[in-house]
Amino acid sequence: MNDRLAITLPTAEQTLAAWQARAAELKQRQLKPGLGRPEQFAGRTGMQVFEAMLAGEIPVPPISATLDFTLVEAEPGRVQFQGRPQFAHYNPMGSVHGGWIATLLDSALACAIHTLLPVGKTYTTVELKVNYVKALTERVPLVRAIGEVIYSGGKIGTSQGKLIGPDGTLFAHATTTCIVLDARQAPY
């Protein structure tokens, strides 16, 4: 075997450490959860909105604090959210409720579409399809919801994604369809 072709993949511990370091880095600069003001969004593309959130110029949405997840990566057509499964998220069967998982996936998938929107456009989710493939518990220290655009057009966007643990375990995968709309000009 050619040594130049050998690839060393990170271990679960290395991945977890990298994820924890990214969360700590972002926590230092993130604003308190809240709603951004209309002027903070005006004149920005979707990607510029996410860059501003990651830079701490626009607050992260309140749901991030409520469900303990946050935006950790954004690039055109691809977004990652990271969450910490907790006992407070459990269903009666003793595992994390599917709604928590769906919320992380909905966020990643829809926001991946949002990154490609031009100035003056917004979106809303029309459909979300989630496949749960493995139970998630608080024994998993962190998970990542990764969303990637499949198609982005003038009126419709579709994306796909997965929820994984630091060891690469797949807990769920999903697809979504979003409708692209003109942004409202009226104050919130």
Image (cartoon, rainbow, N blue to C red):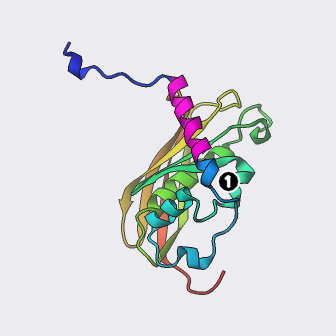
Residue 120 against residue 60 in the figure, above or below: below
Q: Secondary structure at mark 1?
A: helix
* Residue position marked by numbered label 1 in the rendering: 64
For this rendering, which residue is in front, 107 or 25?
25
Q: Quadrant of residue 98?
A: top right
Query: Residue at horizontal 65%, vertical 47%?
Result: 69
Q: Is residue 35 magenta?
A: no
Residue 105 against residue 34 in the figure, above or below: above
Which region is colored magenta? Answer: 12-25
**Residue 158 pos. (x, y %):** 43, 58
Q: Give the residue type that dot 1 points to.
A: Ser
**Residue 162 pos. (x, y %):** 50, 41
Is residue 31 visible in the rendered image? The answer is yes
For this rendering, which residue is in front, 33 or 63?
33
Query: Residue at horizontal 55%, vertical 63%?
Result: 125
Is residue 103 visible in the rendered image? The answer is no
For this rendering, which residue is in front, 24 or 132?
24
Q: Quadrant of residue 6?
A: top left
Q: Is residue 24 magenta?
A: yes
Q: Residue furthest top?
A: 1
23 relative to 177 in the view: left or right = right
